[in-house]
Amino acid sequence: MMTRKMKPGLKKWLLAIFILSLGGASFVWYMFTLKHDDTAQLKVDFTVESLVFINDFKTDLTAANEKYSEKIVVVNGTVSEVEMADTTANIKMVDTTNGDYIIFAFQQQYLNDAKKLKPGEKVSIKGSCSNGDFSAILETYYVTFKRCTINK
Amino acid sequence: MKKGLLSLALVLTTGLLFAQKKTTTSAIINFDATTAIDALPKAENKTVISSLDTKTGKMAFEASIKNFSFTNPRIQEHFNNKGWMDSDQFPTATFVGAIGNIGAVKFSKDGTYPVNVMGNLSIHGITKSIEAKGSIVVKGGAITANSEFSVKLEDYGIDGGAVGAGKVSKEPTISVIAVY
């Protein structure tokens, strides 16, 4: 029986292609299955008081957005409203002197914690600050957060 | 004097109870641009501002683009970048319009009422008129507006490479739920 011996150069090339393909497939798999980290485990970029925080946006919207947008922020304040919507609930902290507000949308696993909060309760909320803007509908300033959790 | 104050209080209370403009800051918009080869480009924004005037049918929405939350952080990053939504330059998507057949909705009677909505949708700095079908559900005093429609991304100048490569639908579906 005759067996053909593979050239050593070809063997190396095939091995390199195999390793590259494996690496590529792993990278694609990693990218496709990537998920946001649990906010509770993330490093805090800023800790602020709710009314001071709203005022930062009102004073200079552009500067505040540059500073806080997509950063992990802990906001200390008082719950003004637990706004139920469909199956979800958002927490609001409102500046009662003018209606400006911060609104927090919670991470799915922490939604029940949000639903348990009551207006008037002091709370510390940690989340990803999306941005602040002026609402033409409500004629107030607002700041939105996503993927929030109660800061413990 | 007492009668005058009582009348004023009654007028104010009645006005509040039957206020025509209903608002919410927790309307939900789901964005679904998934395709057969990519199930990732879909997101939800749960802090959309909306108003509904129950007398005139006027309706408005404001959605912060950066508050659309994707499960995959990389897709979220691409969504906000230039070539896609460019959310630093165009931070908000808005709709200003009205329910065409508002007379058919009985806000004092529980029920589900089919509605037609027309208006101007502004995304990525471009405004186009749209029409969509939806429903108003009245139940125990609560009003819920629902609608589902699709938009052509090219109409709004959105033409990122992923759209051409078939990873993002050219006509994503947008569904809206607002509880007033």
Image (cartoon, coloured by chain):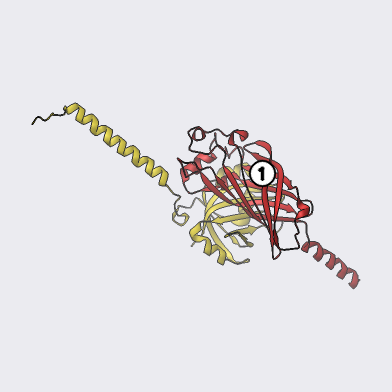
Chain colours: A yellow, B red
Closer to the camera, A141 or B92? B92
Residue A136 can be seen in this image: no
Q: Position of residue B163 (x, y in %)?
A: 51, 35
Count the numbered circles shown.
Answer: 1
| In the displayed structure image, the side of residue A10 where residue B140 appears, left or right | right
Closer to the camera, B172 or B66? B172
Closer to the camera, B7 or A67? B7
The subunit carrying tag 1 is B
Q: Position of residue A36 (x, y in %)?
A: 46, 50
Closer to the camera, A55 or B119? B119
Which residue is most to the right? B1
Q: Residue at x 62, y 39 (%)?
A: B90
Q: Residue at x 26, y 32 (%)?
A: A16
| In the displayed structure image, the side of residue B126 where residue A36 appears, left or right | left
Q: Position of residue A84 (x, y in %)?
A: 61, 61
Residue A6 can be seen in this image: yes
Q: Which residue is mark 1?
A: B94
| In the displayed structure image, the side of residue B174 where residue A136 appears, left or right | right
Q: Quadrant of the N terminus of chain A?
A: top left
In this view, B146 is above or below B87:
below
- Amino acid under disc 1: Thr
